[in-house]
């Protein structure tokens, strides 16, 4: 069996021209991984720059409401408001080791792009972010911040003009620029070593959560919930508990308008994902009979992706994790309940984990101890969330603002 | 490995040119872009204007090894409802219509996987396709596919290897050992569609390729003008023309593609008829 495989999933299906680049990256990653000094440097950086360790907050009101003990892992408190910071800072340190000076990245909603732009600013790298033209239109506020942080944002007009097309475009850049450029892939997907490397940086979540729950409860959780886009935050927290078979690990995908509608991004939970090879790796993809990738849908842009981490695909196929889907509607309800009960504003992505936990909590044994990974905060996504909640006051405000701009620009 | 029928064909075509530095032309087109109907006209125009080999690309939704122009063509073919089954039927028809030209299929691995790798390769062999170019299936992953080519192709269907300047000599050697038909040399860092300087570094790269394989060498990516083809004489055996032909098609249809290849091959034909 070749390296970079997890069961039958993973691998490196890349154009030959990138072979040497991936070989060197794999070498740098393996060297760093074998060097405790690297991890220590990473921990210090995350402590100093991103407020780690993030708390494991006991959700007092929800625990009372559901009569089960509920904890929330606060990845929303990271620099730029999501677990994405763990990955970009790790890869930034690796870039320094490799002597690269330019970072490129794909982004869907702009979360990873923004995290990458902050990393590049802090580390003094040039930065180019590829973003589907449609996403550039939808996520102006993140584009605004990336540009202000000094990154160049390139709208991608090929394909379906969304995340997967941004990945392809970033690969195209890399083919011509690998001498000084590192591709900071944003999730636990893509060709080897990315799934393993990104999961390694994200494992900081699970290491902390394990210690924290043991300190708080004196025992392991019974259930851990995490949303699954590409799979990096789920891999992050699951790694704290993979070797404890009694801990139920639940990955929650985007159920969109419902699995029956076909408008979702549930590659594992829907049972309709088919094993294939695209974007450099082998996993379950939502594709048609010809092998062409399908359009996906989710209220949460960060979960709206056709592929899924090969490591999660393997854990799913081997039965170690369970995959479920939460619909757009369930997610919006869960988001509001969490806000009202605990004063936490979750990202739409993270709200999928919250929604699934809420669905299951009433059926869990009374002694259940649950951890929900809150991968990101929602207040920075005010445009998307206010839209999704159809908030009338917000609409009036936007109309008024638009009118002001059209007067001042006339 | 002894030369396959494709290599023998290429050598014979090269020998027909009465010049010290013969060169063949290989064109590329994306099936279903803008339509199979139009593909048919373009292929006829290419065949009438000196094209020696043709690469027919089966569109894929994630064409990671293609430049923006060809990637866009992939997507537009899919938007117009391209289906693989139809594409394969078209390839069969094309092979029968132009028996003098070796046709190769270029596509991505998932298209093979979706149909079943063996079944796809068996179909390609039955249709008379002479080679497969699958840029996202590196040789260390391709053992089964290469074996299927040998089994079903019986020496008439080659798995075409890609050589790139970024590969180490060791890696080139590994790939060269598996070469059949010809090798596809990627002339520059970067994906298809931008200008290449056919300079010393290319010559150096081709020398490295010659050291690892005795098969003919095709140089891909970036050929736009007759001078580019001339610059490859004495360096490579086959000049690959992709994006430029698509740009001519967009500007002036099949007729413009014919004129373009006519210009590219003129020097060769006069040399051949002298
Ligand atoms: C807050 C948040 N959570 C989750 C995700 C999904 O990514 P992953 O599955 O890699 O954690 C994203 C992606 O943008 C995100 O921004």
Image (spheres, rainbow, N blue to C red):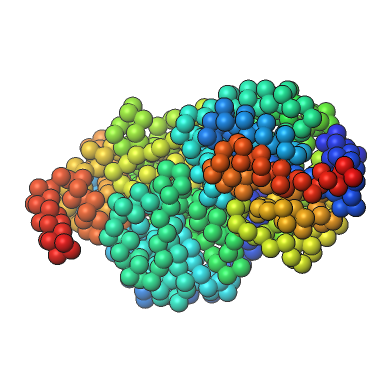
Quadrant position of residue A71: bottom left
Q: Is residue A345 visible?
A: no
- Residue B32 located left or right of residue A49: right
Residue for point 36% across, 46% down = A303
- Residue A404 located left or right of residue A257: left
Q: Nearer the viewer, residue B103 or A259?
A: B103
Please, is residue A149 above or below residue B189 in the view? Answer: below
Quadrant position of residue A53: bottom left
Residue for point 37% across, 44% down = A304
Q: Nearer the viewer, residue B67 or B253?
A: B253
Q: Position of residue B157 (x, y in %)?
A: 78, 32
Residue for point 60% across, 27% down = B87
- Residue B134 located left or right of residue A94: right
Q: Position of residue A223 (x, y in %)?
A: 34, 45
Q: Position of residue B6 (x, y in %)?
A: 82, 36
Q: Nearer the viewer, residue B205 or B23?
A: B23
Residue for point 34% across, 54% down = A136
Q: Quadrant of the C terminus of chain B?
A: top right
């Amino acid at each position: 069996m070749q390296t970079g495989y997890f069961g039958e999933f993973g691998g490196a299906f890349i154009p030959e021209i990138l072979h040497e680049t991936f070989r060197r990256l794999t070498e740098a990653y393996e060297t760093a991984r074998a060097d405790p000094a690297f991890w220590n440097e990473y921990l210090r950086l995350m402590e100093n720059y991103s407020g780690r360790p993030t708390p494991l907050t006991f959700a007092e009101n929800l625990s009372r409401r559901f009569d089960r003990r509920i904890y929330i892992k606060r990845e929303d408190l990271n620099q730029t408001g999501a677990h994405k910071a763990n990955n970009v800072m790790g890869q930034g340190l690796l870039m320094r080791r490799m002597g690269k000076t330019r970072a490129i990245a794909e982004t869907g909603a702009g979360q990873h792009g923004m995290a990458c732009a902050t990393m590049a600013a802090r580390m003094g790298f040039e930065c180019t972010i590829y973003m589907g033209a449609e996403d550039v239109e939808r996520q102006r506020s993140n584009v605004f911040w990336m540009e202000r942080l000094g990154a160049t944002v390139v709208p991608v007009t090929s394909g379906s003009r969304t995340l997967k097309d941004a990945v392809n475009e970033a690969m195209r850049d890399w083919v011509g620029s690998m001498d000084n450029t590192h591709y900071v892939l944003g999730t636990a997907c893509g060709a080897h070593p990315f799934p393993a490397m990104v999961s390694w940086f994200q494992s900081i979540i699970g290491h902390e959560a394990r210690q924290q729950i043991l300190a708080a409860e004196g025992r392991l959780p019974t259930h851990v919930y995490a949303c699954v886009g590409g799979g990096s935050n789920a891999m992050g927290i699951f790694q704290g508990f993979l070797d404890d078979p009694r801990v139920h690990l639940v990955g929650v995908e985007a159920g969109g308008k419902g699995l029956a509608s076909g408008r979702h991004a549930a590659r594992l939970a829907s049972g309709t994902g088919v094993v294939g090879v695209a974007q450099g790796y082998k996993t379950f993809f939502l594709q048609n009979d010809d092998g062409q990738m399908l359009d996906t849908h989710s209220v949460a842009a960060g979960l709206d992706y056709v592929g899924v981490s090969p490591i999660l695909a393997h854990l799913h196929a081997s039965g170690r994790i369970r995959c479920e889907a939460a619909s757009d509607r369930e997610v919006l309800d869960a988001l509001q309940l969490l806000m009202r009960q605990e004063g936490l504003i979750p990202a739409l992505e993270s709200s999928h984990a919250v929604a699934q936990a809420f669905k299951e909590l009433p059926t869990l044994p009374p002694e259940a101890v649950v951890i929900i990974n809150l991968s990101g905060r929602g207040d920075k996504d005010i445009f998307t969330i206010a839209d999704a909640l159809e908030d009338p006051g917000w609409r009036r405000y936007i109309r008024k603002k638009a009118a002001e701009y059209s007067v001042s620009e006339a | 490995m002894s030369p396959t029928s494709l290599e023998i064909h290429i050598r014979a075509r090269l020998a027909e040119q009465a010049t010290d530095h013969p060169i063949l032309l290989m064109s590329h087109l994306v099936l279903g872009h803008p339509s199979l109907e139009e593909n048919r006209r373009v292929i006829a125009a290419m065949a009438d204007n000196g094209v020696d080999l043709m690469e027919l690309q089966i569109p894929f939704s994630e064409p990671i090894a293609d430049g923006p122009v060809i990637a866009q063509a992939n997507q537009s073919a899919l938007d117009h409802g391209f289906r693989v089954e139809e594409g394969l039927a078209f390839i069969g028809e094309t092979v029968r219509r132009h028996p003098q030209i070796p046709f190769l299929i270029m596509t991505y691995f998932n298209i093979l996987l979706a149909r079943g790798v063996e079944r796809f390769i068996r179909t390609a062999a039955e249709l008379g396709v002479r080679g497969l170019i699958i840029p996202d299936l590196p040789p260390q992953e391709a053992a089964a596919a290469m074996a299927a080519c040998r089994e079903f192709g019986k020496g008439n269907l080659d798995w075409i290897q890609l050589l790139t300047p970024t590969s180490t000599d060791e890696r080139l050697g590994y790939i060269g050992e598996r070469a059949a038909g010809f090798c596809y040399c990627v002339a520059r860092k970067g994906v298809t569609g931008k200008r290449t300087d056919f300079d010393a570094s290319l010559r150096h790269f081709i020398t490295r390729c010659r050291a690892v394989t005795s098969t003919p060498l095709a140089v891909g990516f970036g050929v736009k003008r007759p001078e580019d083809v001339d610059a490859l004489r004495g360096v490579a055996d086959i000049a690959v023309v992709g994006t430029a032909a698509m740009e001519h098609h967009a500007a002036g249809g099949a007729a413009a593609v014919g004129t373009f290849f006519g210009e590219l091959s003129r020097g060769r034909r006069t040399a051949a008829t002298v």
